[in-house]
Image (spheres, helix red, strand yellow):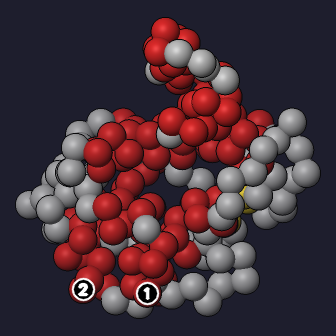
Amino acid sequence: LSFDELNRRYNFRNFVELDEAWQITLDTKELNNKFFEKISNWFYWAATKVKFKDKTFHSEVTEDNANNLIKIISRLIFIYFLKERKLIPEDLFYKDKIFPLIDKNEPNETAYYKAILQNLFFGILNTPISNGRFKKLRNKNYLRDEAAIEKLFSEIPFVNGGLFDIADEPYSNSENILTVSDDLFFGKEREID
């Protein structure tokens, strides 16, 4: 937080009050509450904006959507920490860098999840480097510049663990019913009651 924002929020008048304001702001419990509030807001909003197995959007959270979104959130949090450790290129998470490399010609605009995140989760992080990981890339029809995407993926390490197991991914190649809107990752932040 900036000095002005801190002062607006706590209206401090001296150094002791400024120190108290910083202590409150940087309190781990407070930061955790803010983090989980943002995750919760995203979760409840996203649950009505995705389709997994049943081909329909729901106005309320369904058990299927909730379970699948929890898996996505867990994977996203894990890759966020990999990105922070510089093990995953930041360009994968910036719209202006990644959208020119993918084909977004789909009505529900789910190209980012299908082209980038599914490949990152199940083709790259879940496959040893020496095992022909690029042969396992899926949804190649969403890749406008496959060579550039392979280059971004090339230095990402193999993560041996069940978090990126393909067996629990609700995916249908023939019916193309999986929809996880690009807006969930690049849209404006929303507050949910």
Mark 1 is on which residue type?
Answer: Pro
Instruction: Point out residue 190 in the picture as x, y percentages from the top left corner.
Output: 75, 51
Query: From the viewer's perspective, is residue 108 above or below residue 83?
Result: below
Q: Residues within 10 Å of mark 2 (few under 14, many from 20)?
A: few
Please give left or right for residue 30 compared with residue 82 in the image.
Answer: right
Element type where label 1 sits in the image? helix
The residue at which mark 1 appears reads as 100
Query: From the viewer's perspective, is residue 95 above or below residue 106?
Result: above
- Which is nearer the N-term, disc 1 or disc 2? 1
Please give left or right for residue 157 compared with residue 17 in the image.
Answer: left
**Quadrant where the C terminus lies?**
top right
Name the residue located 46 percent from the left edge and 46 percent from the top edge.
Answer: 76
Q: Number of callouts in the render?
A: 2
Mark 2 is on which residue type?
Answer: Ala
The residue at which mark 2 appears reads as 147
Q: Is residue 52 visible?
A: no
- Per the model, the C-alpha gap separating discs 1 and 2 is 13 Å
Q: Splitting the image into 4 quarters, where does residue 184 fall?
A: bottom right
Q: Residues within 10 Å of mark 1 (few under 14, many from 20)?
A: few
Name the residue located 20 percent from the left edge and 51 percent from the top edge.
Answer: 87
Query: From the viewer's perspective, is residue 101 above or below residue 84?
Result: below
Name the residue located 42 percent from the left edge and 63 percent from the top edge.
Answer: 93
Name the residue located 68 percent from the left edge and 44 percent from the top edge.
Answer: 42
Instruction: Point out residue 45 in the picture as x, y percentages from the top left corner.
Output: 77, 48
Q: In this view of the protein, which residue sits in the foreground, 130 or 61? A: 61
